[in-house]
């Protein structure tokens, strides 16, 4: 046993030299007990308190637009370098491990502040062409970690994206809404009807994409809609 432990320790040390593990944010070499982020950067993350103003701001974006029971956001996206870098690493550098890591962090934080009473989690779907081009759906990977943490079924099959929309980065609220109208379709209504569902996205700005998805799901018979996002832009 000691020989095996010694070999494992030596092998891990060898991998750290050949393939150094660095913090995603500050690039500091990670300690053996650290994963993806160093302890210092984890402590500096702008995690949102359940009673913080950001949650009220999140809910207010949908007043009079869509009936949503609960809104949950893990991080505040204020264009700080750290959060922007995390999202860029996930979305454009295809860091699936980082996406799943933050999904699990989201879930752990959620369990500390909320009760779980959902039937399924549906990540915002990507159009097949865009997903093929990007290589994966970042919201789906985040949702996978979130699902595992809170013990709720992940549903990636019941809703699809039928319209390949333009990027919304530089669009205003009206343009974003026009861009995402009628872009989703339910293909398995039995998994939606009378279910309490969480719709999950990576980042919410105006909320137009979540609004469009929620309308599609509610029309298919969902009894309750909740939103969960990795970050909310204030």
Image: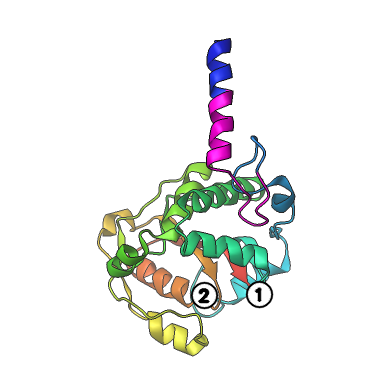
Answer whether residue 212 is visible to the viewer in this image: yes
The answer to if 26 sits in the magenta stretch is yes
Answer whether residue 70 is visible to the viewer in this image: no
Q: Quadrant of the C terminus?
A: bottom right
* Residue that numbered label 1 is attached to: 234
Range shown magenta: 9-29
Check residue 33 in the rendering and tell me which mark sits there, or answer none. Answer: none
Q: Residues within 10 Å of mark 1 (few under 14, many from 20)?
A: few
Q: Say which residue appears at 71% left-offset and 58% top-offset.
A: 49
Most foreground residue, 108 or 16: 16
Which is more N-terminal, label 1 or label 2?
A: 2
**Contact, mark 2 vs mark 1 (Cβ under 8 Å):** no
Q: In this image, 8 relative to 193: left or right?
A: right
**Rendered view: 61 above or below 136:** below
Most foreground residue, 94 or 102: 94
**Rendered view: 58 above or below 119:** below
Check residue 207 in the rendering and tell me which mark sits there, or answer none. Answer: 2
Most foreground residue, 8 or 50: 8
Most foreground residue, 81 or 16: 16
- Disc 2 or disc 1, which is closer to the eye? 1
Secondary structure found at label 1 = loop
Q: Say which residue appears at 33% left-offset and 64% top-offset.
A: 131
């Amino acid at each position: 046993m000691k020989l095996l432990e010694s070999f494992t320790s030596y092998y891990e040390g060898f991998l750290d030299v050949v393939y150094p593990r660095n913090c995603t944010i500050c690039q500091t070499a990670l300690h053996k007990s650290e994963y993806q982020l160093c302890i210092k950067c984890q402590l500096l993350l702008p995690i949102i308190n359940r009673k913080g103003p950001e949650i009220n701001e999140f809910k207010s974006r949908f007043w009079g637009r869509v009936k949503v029971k609960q809104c949950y956001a893990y991080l505040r996206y204020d264009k700080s370098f750290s959060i922007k870098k995390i999202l860029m690493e996930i979305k454009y550098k295809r860091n699936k491990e980082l996406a799943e890591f933050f999904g699990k962090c989201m879930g752990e934080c959620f369990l500390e502040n909320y009760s779980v009473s959902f039937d399924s989690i549906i990540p915002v779907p990507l159009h097949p062409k865009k997903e093929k081009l990007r290589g994966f759906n970042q919201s789906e990977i985040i949702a996978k970690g979130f699902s595992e943490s809170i013990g709720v079924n992940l549903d990636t099959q019941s809703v699809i994206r039928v319209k390949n929309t333009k990027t919304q980065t530089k669009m205003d609220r009206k343009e974003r809404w026009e861009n995402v109208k009628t872009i989703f379709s339910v293909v398995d209504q039995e998994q939606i009807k009378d279910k309490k569902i969480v719709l999950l996205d990576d980042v919410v700005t105006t909320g137009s994409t979540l609004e469009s998805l929620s309308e599609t799901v509610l029309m298919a018979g969902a009894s309750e809609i909740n939103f969960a996002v990795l970050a909310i832009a204030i």
